[in-house]
Every structure is written in structure tokens, then in C-alpha cells.
Image (cartoon, rainbow, N blue to C red):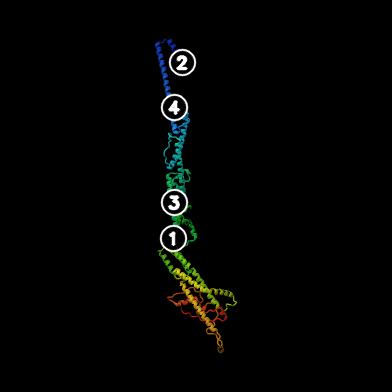
Amino acid sequence: MAVTEAENPLLGEVTCGTLLQKLQEIWDEVGESDEERDKLLLQIEEECLNVYKHKVELAAKSRAELLQTLSDANVELSNLTTALGDKSYIGIPDKTSGTIKEQLSAIAPALEQLWQQKEERVREFSNVQSQIQKICEEIAGGLSNGTHVVDETDLSLKRLDDYKSKLQELQKEKSDRLSKVLEFVSTVHDLCSVLGLDFLSTVTEVHPSLDEANGVHAKSISNETLSKLATTVLTLKEDKRQRLEKLQELATQLTELWNLMDTPDEERELFDHVTCNISASVHQVTVSGALALDLIEQAEVEVDRLDKLKASRMKEIAFKKQTELEEIYARAHIEIKPEVVRERIMSLIDAGNTEPAELLAEMDSQIAKAKEEAFSRKEILDRVEKWMSACEEESWLEDYNRDQNRYSASRGAHLNLKRAEKARILVSKITAMVDTLVTKTRAWEEDNSMSFEYDGVPLLAMLDEYTMLRQEREEEKRRLKEQKKQQEQPPHTDQDSAFGSRPSPGRPVSAKKPVGARANGGGGSNETPRRLSMNSNQNGSKSKRDSLNKLTSPSKLVAVSTEEASSSPPVSCPDPVLASP
């Protein structure tokens, strides 16, 4: 060792050899024995060996640590690739040759990149899972399922895609739930508007987040909220249905009371907002406040008021309808006993045993039947009116024919002449009128299985009597005409010269009558046939004779034609006494 150290070319450098040489010199000066020197040298060698041994141990330990690090790196690399699901990562070294540090240097970049990729993948998983958890909590009604933890053992793209698919499904479900919530809220708003309820208080009772002040995405979409909203909507719809039924019932009562009491349109218009929905369905009522409680209460108050008013006006209404019924019968010339009917109405109303609506409904039914009966009689009544009008013209014509001044140049003479011409034409049609009227009347009686009465008298009896009287009148006219001819024959010459000329006792001179004058007393009256008193049980033939005096004037029976009247002065004859048939 001394030789090796002594041959060190680096002079002036402190080495083990120089130190031993220096120690040898010191020992020489001191005179140290060889034994002592060997002992010291052996001690120095042992100490040096311990130092080397320690260093070797440290080096071995460092190598073991590096090997462990390399092993851990390989394991981590394998775990990362497994977790990320990418077995064929490009940056991973394919072989394990070279020193340990070279191998570590080769694997370190791949590990770094995988670590970064893992951190990015963990963030993606965390973001997706946090959104999933948030939506699940919203669906669950805000109940937290705890903090979510990302499972780093499986960070594969396939698993991430699964989470993303689940997130999309939840987002769609959230959107559907939100749409359903908004639809429910809109329905509640419309129902509250129609019912006159406070929408804000109604909807916030379900969940505070349903307030309009909150954003759309802040509204609760939980099962509980949806269930409460559905229940609220059903409750409001049922309330709407019940209120509509109540309102329609009140509207019907109002209409019946109005019709019952003939309420004017101005008063009815005050409740148009009530009656406008009288036949509407539940879905058709959408006007704000249409079914509010105050509106229903207002209608109830009005119905109560009209009910109280109805009792006091019932008699007036009933008598008004009875008057209408009597007018229909009067126009149709149907005889009734109004006093008895009015007494019956009074007794029914005073007794209170009959509902006013039922009584008026019965009267309305009678009015409808009366109108129907009047309509069926109209054609015959029109013909009766024409017949009576023709009889009036016939009476006027007879008076006109008896007037000695009808051809004078007095005022209106030409008008009377024109009227007389028209009257003659009309009178010539009377027989056909009567025949047609008899045919129509009999057909009507066969169809209705009842007698056709005119103001209480059978019309056929009136027509038969009129026909009979007309025939008697024609016979009387012919008799008087023959009598006149006999009286107008010239007397024998010797008798005339012996006794002179004198008026015939059968032809007394009478005073002239103006046109249209009516003969009284024995002369009779020119009245138009309006009603015959046909009481066969009491008056018999005398009743017919009275009717004859009303139907045809006795003066008509003695009236002569216009030509005869112009050729000779009129002769006054006593009224004929008509024998009873």
C-alpha cells in the first residue's frame, strides 16, 4: 500500500499513501515498535473496511429503492392504463433494458402524461356525477344523497359515456317534469282566474319555488310537487264544475222568474254575465271571474229577491195571461166563461197548493192550444167575415134601392152609385159564399170531432137558418111583386068613371126614407148576422124568428128592384109576420 501510494503521480495531494508515509515518519521519530505499528495499521484497515461496507450497504439500499420505485412506476403505469381503459398507450416503453435509472427516465414521461389524463378524466367524472346527483336530488325533492366520490379504479371512456347517457336521460326527464310543472301551474292560473281565487297563495301552498318571481329552472320538479299540483288541479276543476252547476241552476231560476214576471230586458242585462253560461260546458268557461263566489252570491240574492217578488206579482201575471187567453178566444169567436176561470185562479193562488210556475205553465199550455185552435178556425172565420160583410152590403143596397132621391144630383150621389154597383156584384156571390162556408165547416167538424161554434152558436145552424130565411125572403119578394102587378092593372072604364080614381088599399103611400135609414118597430132593422141565439130547449121556433129579425130585415123582403122603383112610386106595406118554422 505504501508503494502504491508513493507512486501516486499527484504530488502535494493528500492521499492514504501520503498519510501512511507521514505516520511512518512520526513512528520512526517516536520509536514505535513494530508490534504497535502492526496493531495500529490493522485498526486502520478495519476502520476503512467498515467505511466501505457502509457505503456498499447504502449503495445496495439505494439500488433497492430505485428498483422499488421502478416497480411502483410499472405498477402505477399498469393501474393508470387499466383505469383509463387505454391498454395501448403510445408513450409507454416497450422494453425494460438498460440501467434502473434509464428505465425510470424512460417511464417517467408516460406516467406524468397518464397522471394528467387521469386528473382530467376525474374532473369529467366528477362534473357528470355532480350533475346527475343534483338532478336526482331535485327529483327526490331536495333530499341529499351525500357527497359523491369518483371511483378512480374505472375511469374508462365507456364508463364516462354511460354516465353521460344517464345524465342526458335525467336532463330529459327534468325537462319533461319542468314542462309538466309549468303546464300544471298554467292550468292552476287559469282556474284561479275563472274562480276568482288568489293564484300566488294557491300555487305557493304547493311549493314556494312555484312563485312567478322565481326563474323557470328554479322551480321544484319533485314527485311530491307534481303530485300536489295534480291534486290541486283536480280540486280546482271539481270546484269549477260545482260552481258552474250552481251558477247554471241560478241562471235557469233567474230566466224562469224573468219569464214568469215579464222582466224588461234592461233589468235582465244586469245579469248577462250569469246567464251567458247557462248552457256552457266546463271547458267553455274561461272568462276571468266568471265563477267567482261573489258573483254566485249576487245571483243567489237576486233569485231570493225575485222569489219574494213573485208571490206578490203572481196574480197580476196570471190575470195577464188569462187576458191574453181571452183575447185569443175572442178573436177566434170562441165563447168562454172568464169569470169562472179568474175565480179559480184566485183560489189556487190564495190557497198556495199549486206552484206558480206550474200554474203559469198550464196557462201557457192553454194559450198554445188556444192559438192552435184559432189557427185551425182562421180560414172559416175569414169566410164568415166576408159573408157578414156581404150581408152588410146587401142591407145597405136595399136601403139604397128604397131611396127615391138616389139619382138626384146631390153631393156623394155618384159615390153611392159606384158602391151600389159593387154591392150588387158582392150580393150575387152570397149564395156561393154560404155553400162554401157550409162545406168548409162540415169538413172542420169531421176533422176535429166537434161542433164549430161562432160566439157560442153553432155556425152550421146559423148558416141553415140564414139559408131558410133567405129563401123565405125571396118567396116574400116574389109574392109582393105579383101583388104589385095585380094592383097596377088598370080598372074597368065604367067603374073608373063612376067612382073615380083612388089609391089602392093594398098600396098605402109611405114617407120616403133616406139611404141607410133603419126601419123600427114593424119595419124591422137591417142588421148584419153576427150571432144567433139558438136555445132550442127554451125558446124553440121563437128563438129562430128572433134570429131571423137580426139576420134579415123585413124591409128587405119588400124592397123592389131599382128599375121598378124608378117606374112607379114606392108603396108602403106592413111588415110581414113570419111564421115559426
- Circle count: 4
Q: Which residue is mark 4?
A: 70
| Residues under numbered marks 2 and 4 in contact, where contact means CB atoms less than 8 Å apart | no
N-terminal label among 3 and 1: 3
Mark positioned earlier in the residue sequence (4 or 3)? 4
Asked if marks 3 and 1 touch (Cβ < 8 Å), the reply is: no
Question: How much space separates mark 4 and mark 1, taking CA atoms?
Answer: 105 Å
Q: Position of residue 340 (x, y in %)?
A: 43, 69
Tell whether label 2 touches label 1 (CB within 8 Å). Answer: no
Q: Nearer the viewer, mark 3 or mark 1?
A: 3
Task: Determine whether the residue tagged by mark 2 lies in a helix, strand or loop.
Answer: loop
Amino acid type at image mark 4: Leu
SS of the residue at dot 1?
helix
Q: Which residue is mark 3?
A: 237
Mark 3 falls on what kind of element?
A: helix
- Closest to the observer, 24 or 331: 331
Q: Which residue is mark 2?
A: 15
**In the image, what residue type sits under mark 1?**
Asp
Residue 129 in the image: above or below residue 564: above
Q: Name the front one of labels 1 and 2.
A: 2
Q: Are marks 4 and 3 in contact (CB under 8 Å)?
A: no
Q: Is residue 516 visible?
A: no
Q: Residue furthest right?
A: 409
Q: CA distance from mark 2 to mark 4?
A: 38 Å
Q: Please tell me which residue is depicted at 46% across the width and 61% down the height of the picture.
A: 259
Q: Which residue is mark 1?
A: 307
Who comes first in sequence, dot 1 or dot 2?
Answer: 2
Distance, label 3 to label 1, CA atoms, is 31 Å
How far apart, in angstroms, are the residues tagged by discs 3 and 2? 109 Å
Q: Earlier in the sequence, mark 2 or mark 4?
A: 2
**Residue at mark 1 to residue at mark 2: CA–CA distance:** 137 Å
